[in-house]
Image (tube, rainbow, N blue to C red):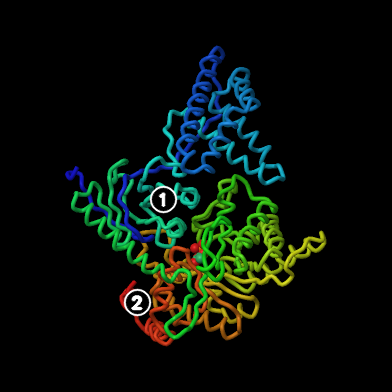
Amino acid sequence: MNAERKVLSGNPVSAGIAYAKAYVYYPQELRVTKSYFPEGEEEKNLKVFHDAFACASKELDGLYESLRREDESKAKIFAAHKEILEDEEILDEIQMAIEEERMNPEFAIEKVFHEFADLLSKVADPLIAGRAADLYDVKNRLIRICQGKEERNLAWLSEDVIVIAHDLFPSDTATMDRTHVKGIVTEIGGANSHSAILARSFRIPAVLGVADAMTEIPDGSLLIMDALSGELVVYPSEEEIQVNEKRKQEFLKKKKEEEQYLDKPAVMKDGTQISIGINVGSAEYDVPEKQYDFVGLFRTEFLYMGNNCLPSEEEQFQAYKKVVERAKGHPVTLRTLDIGGDKTLPYMELPKEENPFLGKRALRLCLSEDALFRTQLRAVLRASVYGPLKVMFPMVGSMEDIYRAKECVERAKESLRAEGIAFDEDIKIGIMIEIPSIALIADLAADEVDFASVGSNDLTQYVSAADRMNPGVTSYYQNYSPAMFRLLGHIFEAFESRGKEVSVCGEMAGNPQAAVALAGLGAKKLSMSAANIAGVKAALAGVSLEEARNIAEHCRQIKTESEIKEFLGI
Ligand code: PEP
Ligand code: MG
């Protein structure tokens, strides 16, 4: 084994240590061409379909059985897929398309399933409309089998693995089998890419930006992954495995020590309290109430990304209501759709752009898609009667953006009033500060909105003109540059002096040392992945506000990011 030992390295973006088998993941492309077969080959093609049907049925039974004991709810999904597979109407239509129209089996499957899914997705009941996604799943299973490809997905794995991929779509990460994925390695993606953010929130160790990982790491090889240092060892020696295990235990011990702070408020040495928020991507989050004071960022795009069509107003309303109810009185900041950049919707064609991060992203897209934005705003407003809910716009670049977004809220309110539907008339409206042009006029913006939250991931990208996804410019993407510290200080001061709330919900807020510096700069509210709460609370408990201020002031004066990081111990 030792002969094949290899050491690779990348960016550790989600702390942890793992040792498992590599699972090289390439998303399957199932292209189906519109094709017909010659007369006389009906039997042969029907057999192809029947064989695929039998194989799909066997796969689904296997999945159901293997999951039944572990995870009843996931097992049920496969039972439902089996019912879809056996649906007589669908089967008849496919067989007819093959026998009578001489459609190639793959094409017949694609066409028939598409027609049924289309019908379902138009039904107003979100539960029924949601079944369209299951139909697509069954269709893909049949087509994959027809094409003779093996199953490859991340949602259902049978053993512990470290996933190796070129890149992961946020939807891959969001649906990942969290019991069996022990680590994530990708060839591209920076510390603040959305896959990194999801990995941290799921507490899955991740090392991104590992050049040629897909070819350098054989599928099935044993792998040590140190997501503290960023080092990977393929086919490690027995001794390395033992050292790794020791490091893992030390890491877990430190985590355990920090956990004593989890259920307590974040209080600094001198008694100053910092309000701790959580960033969530769905209504299903599971964080005990005591651990946080508010939901600082509800990224609603994941609801859209997990669907096969735009979620209806009712579907969104139910999801938003659920988040508010789950927060049990803690205020919830709901961010309107932030799509574009590295986040796309499979069912919505976005304009092809040379620089999507500088293009029609987030609020810009919503402002140009009236119906889409109105649907979301109406759903948010309707949910606002169930608890303290605030609405926040991403990618705001100017006062014009603020005026236009507020007008949209006003129009959504009027339409609800006209229909006699209840909502919170005083719903608080805020902005994300992610673009330098709004950061620089934070004082003017503060007069026009109720609150702001600094999206330091994007703010860094736009301040430093370095793509947050591109590992080739990692050293230019400087979260901790003196420029960032000066700009952040200016933003906090502008909002605080006007008595308006300001928080930080970018990844910086979840870094314990950075959190101390942010508190010193004037931040009173920090929102982060739940996984970071204990570490941040522990770090804040270790300093007084005065000490944090001195640290922050020093960061504003230091000349380079590397010196700041060294000074802060990041
Ligand atoms: C940010 O940009 O800092 C932020 C919180 O938003 P996202 O990471 O979703 O772009
Ligand atoms: Mg952002």
Q: Which one is in front, 321 or 471?
A: 321
User: Horizontally, is 421 left or right of 559 in the view?
Assistant: right
Which residue is identified by label 1? 167
- With respect to residue 292, does 441 lie above or below? below
Q: Earlier in the sequence, mark 2 or mark 1?
A: 1
Residue at the image position 47 percent from the left and 40 percent from the top: 69
- Tell me how far mark 2 sits from mark 1, CA to CA: 31 Å
Residue 346, position in %: x, y?
56, 46
Q: Which one is in front, 252 or 531?
A: 252
Secondary element under disc 2, as helix, strand or loop, is helix
Other residues around mark 2 within 10 Å, as few (<14) / some (14–19) / many (≥20): some
In the image, farthest residue toward the top: 40
User: Horizontally, is 372 left or right of 75 in the view?
Assistant: right
Residue at the image position 61 percent from the left and 69 percent from the top: 331
- Counting the numbered discs, the total is 2
Residue 341, position in %: x, y?
51, 57
Which residue is identified by label 2? 568
Residue 505, position in %: x, y?
51, 69
Q: Amino acid at mark 2?
A: Leu
Pair 2/1: label in front: 2
Looking at the rendered structure, which numbered label has been put on residue 374? Answer: none
Q: Which one is in front, 379 or 156?
A: 156
Kindly check if marks 2 and 1 are in contact, taking CB atoms under 8 A apart as contact.
no
Pick the quarter of the image with the C terminus. Answer: bottom left
Pick the quarter of the image with the N terminus. Answer: top left
Other residues around mark 1 within 10 Å, as few (<14) / some (14–19) / many (≥20): many
Q: Quadrant of residue 539?
A: bottom left
- With respect to residue 82, does 342 lie above or below? below
Secondary element under disc 1, as helix, strand or loop, is loop
Residue at the image position 38 percent from the left and 54 percent from the top: 188
Q: Amino acid at mark 1?
A: Asp
